[in-house]
Amino acid sequence: MTKKFILTLKRSLIGCTQDQKDAVRCLGLRKRQSSAIVNDTLANRGQIMKVQHLVDVVVKG
């Protein structure tokens, strides 16, 4: 079974760059306090690192 991340958007996207907004959208997050489960891939890790100050990450499995 692959490892997964549970992401929760903790901060607003107001004042963020367009790259950060796109990364949050690609991770499946829409509004503040929304959560999404994503697989542990290199692409997802890169997007998480780009917005690590905006999201809360929990490792699952």
Image (spheres, rainbow, N blue to C red):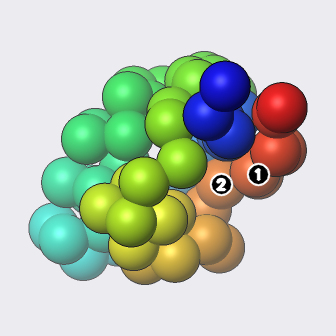
Q: Residue at x 83, y 44 (%)?
A: 58
Q: Dot 2: within a 10 Å radius of its alpha carbon, few (fewer than 14), some, or many (20 or more) residues?
A: many
Vertical position of residue 31 compared to residue 46: above or below: above
Residue 2 in percent (x, y) is at 62, 34
Residue found 75% across the figure and 51% down from its top: 57
Q: Is residue 48 above or below residue 29?
A: below
Q: Is any part of residue 51 visible from this angle?
A: no
Q: Which residue is mark 2?
A: 55
Quarter-of-image position of residue 53: bottom right
Residue sitting at 54 percent across and 48 percent down?
Answer: 40
In the displayed structure, 11 sits above or below 27; it is below
> As rendered, which of 3 and 55 lies closer to the eye?
3
Q: Which residue is mark 1?
A: 56
Mark-to-mark CA distance, 2 and 1: 4 Å
Which amino acid type is marked by label 2? Val
- The foreground one among 24 and 57 is 57
Residue 26 is at least partly visible in this image: yes
Q: Amino acid at mark 1?
A: Asp
The label shown at residue 33 is none
